[in-house]
Image: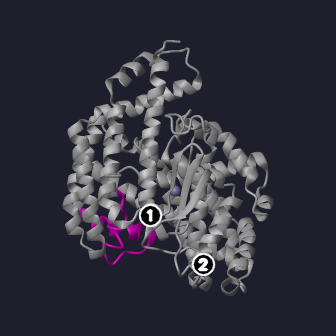
């Protein structure tokens, strides 16, 4: 073995440690920092980001990677570190510095414009920023390179190696199956159970979440659960994985399910071997794979009949007044109550992916120059009518509702749906291999499932690409079928009728 690896490794550790500093700063910004610290903190974070970037694109790293690329004496893990780092290095060095700066400045401006435009319902004020940002993202895609499909280069940042046409095909199958199923379910769903929107004391919600996440296997001596307005999970470094949840005065299930969702992300991070965590191959291979873990715990586990049967008595102990009279059937239906919502983040498991299909369709069309920014609001209304049968009265409840585009995160939305599809497929495989998990879940015991996920997914980090990992676990490429089957069976069971 050449000494190139010995020279590269300290640089990997340095990049990991710089990322750790950035993570701690942004966790603190979202959870602990007093409001007046904002502007100075933003500057500190951008200094750390610039420093990290300059260390990554150091030509010495390029030379070492070049030397190591064909080195057969490296073991599988080291080869994975080299491959993953080479991918980030190439992407980072292909984008000219001027473009990096322009993207960062313009996304800052676009985000600020969005923050004002959404409550003011003023798409016209946001549109020029989105136009500029979209033009820069196309430039970025061209700089990174693609074979005629620019969106591939943008998608690759979040879902490496996945192609636009593959995602289009999966969405076509998924939407084709979902639309009639949603129609059928909504006809029989009836009224929203009243307990879903009663008053629940927020301190008790938080206490309940603390107990619940431990119960699911989240290790508190290697993590924290705090409150923040937008729940998220962030790894600081080995032995330090932090998640947040949110309480709201007029509902308890949002808090419960957002805690279960983030616990899925956090269990994944706690399951990546500590000695590789944060190094190039010590990460999830894609956002879709990461999201598969959160969605599986939230939906396949958390919203199952078995787990809601476990959950209800626990919740009744904490909220005896509010939930004392609720029976298990009603609770299960409530935890899975479907509705035609305008807002993606409020959508239920059944309709959620129809919201994502629209966003994916529109952003691909914009990147392909088939749709102008000015045409977005109309295209949004038309798509909502087509996919969900509801049309927003305002752009605030329509095209302006999500933050992603204002940050230049184009190519991100489909990863939510890929995660949902992976979740259903992985869970089905887990039950094929472990047998029925319902008896475990009825006791609130996710340990057999967690052991399976650790062995089949978590411990591999990024040794395999998302596609390779998926095929290793599933024995076949990902399709929409497991998710469609799962939803159909579940909603037939809930409403006792063929759909
Ligand atoms: Zn998530």
Residue 114 makes an appearance in the image: yes
Residue shown at 56% from the left, 82% from the top: 197
Magenta region includes residue 384: yes
**x, y (%) of residue 211?**
68, 65
Is 75 situated left or right of 123 in this image?
right
| Highlighted range, magenta | 375-404
The residue beneath circle 2 is 189
The residue beneath circle 1 is 355
Marks 1 and 2: CB-CB under 8 Å?
no
Residue shown at 58% from the left, 21% from the top: 75
Query: Does residue 496 sit above or below 199 in this rendering?
Result: above
Magenta region includes residue 385: yes
Disc tally is 2
> Residue 316, located in which quarter of the rendered image?
bottom right
Q: CA distance from mark 1 to mark 2?
A: 20 Å
Q: Which mark is residue 139?
A: none
């Amino acid at each position: 073995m050449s000494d190139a690896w010995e020279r590269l490794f300290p640089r990997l550790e340095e990049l990991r440690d710089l990322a750790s500093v950035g993570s701690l700063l942004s966790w603190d910004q979202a959870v602990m920092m007093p409001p007046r610290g904002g502007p100075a903190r933003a500057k500190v974070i951008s200094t750390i980001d610039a420093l990290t970037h300059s260390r990554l694109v150091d030509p010495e790293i390029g030379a070492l990677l070049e030397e190591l690329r064909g080195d057969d004496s490296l073991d599988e893990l080291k080869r994975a570190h080299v491959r993953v780092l080479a991918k980030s290095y190439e992407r980072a060095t292909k984008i000219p510095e001027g473009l990096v700066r322009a993207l960062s400045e313009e996304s800052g401006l676009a985000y600020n414009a969005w923050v004002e435009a959404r409550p003011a319902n003023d798409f016209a004020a946001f549109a020029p920023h989105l136009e500029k940002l979209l033009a820069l993202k196309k430039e970025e895609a061209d700089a990174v390179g693609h074979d005629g499909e620019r969106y591939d280069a943008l998608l690759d940042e979040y879902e490496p190696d996945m192609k636009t046409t593959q995602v289009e095909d999966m969405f076509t199958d998924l939407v084709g199956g979902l639309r009639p199923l949603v129609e059928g379910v909504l006809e029989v769903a009836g009224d929203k159970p009243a307990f879903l929107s009663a008053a629940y004391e927020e301190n008790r919600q938080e206490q309940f979440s603390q107990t619940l996440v431990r119960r699911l296997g989240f290790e508190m001596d290697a993590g924290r659960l705090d409150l923040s307005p937008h729940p998220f999970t962030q790894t600081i470094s080995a032995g330090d994985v932090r998640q947040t949840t949110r309480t709201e005065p007029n509902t308890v299930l949002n808090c419960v399910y957002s805690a279960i969702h983030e616990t899925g992300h956090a269990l994944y991070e706690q399951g990546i071997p500590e000695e590789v965590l944060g190094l190039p191959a010590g990460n999830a291979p894609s956002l879709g794979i990461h999201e598969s873990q959160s969605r599986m715990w939230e939906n396949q586990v958390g919203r199952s009949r078995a787990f809601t049967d476990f959950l209800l008595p626990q919740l009744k102990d904490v909220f005896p007044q509010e939930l004392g009279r609720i029976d298990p059937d009603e609770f299960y239906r409530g935890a899975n109550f479907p509705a035609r919502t305008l807002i993606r983040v409020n959508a239920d498991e059944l309709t959620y992916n129809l919201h994502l299909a629209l966003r994916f369709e529109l952003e691909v069309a914009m990147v392909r120059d088939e749709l102008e920014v000015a045409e977005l609001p109309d295209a949004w209304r038309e798509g909502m009518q087509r996919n969900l049968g509801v049309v927003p009265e305002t752009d605030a409840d329509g095209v302006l509702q999500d933050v992603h585009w204002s940050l230049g995160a184009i190519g991100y939305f489909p990863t939510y749906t890929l995660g949902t599809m992976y979740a259903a497929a992985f869970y089905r495989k887990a039950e094929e291999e472990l047998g029925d998990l319902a008896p475990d879940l009825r006791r609130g015991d996710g340990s057999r499932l967690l052991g399976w996920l650790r062995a089949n997914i978590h411990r591999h980090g990024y040794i395999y690409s998302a596609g390779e990992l998926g095929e290793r676990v599933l024995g076949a490429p990902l399709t929409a079928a497991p998710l469609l089957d799962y939803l159909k069976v579940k909603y037939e069971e809930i409403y006792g009728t063929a759909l």
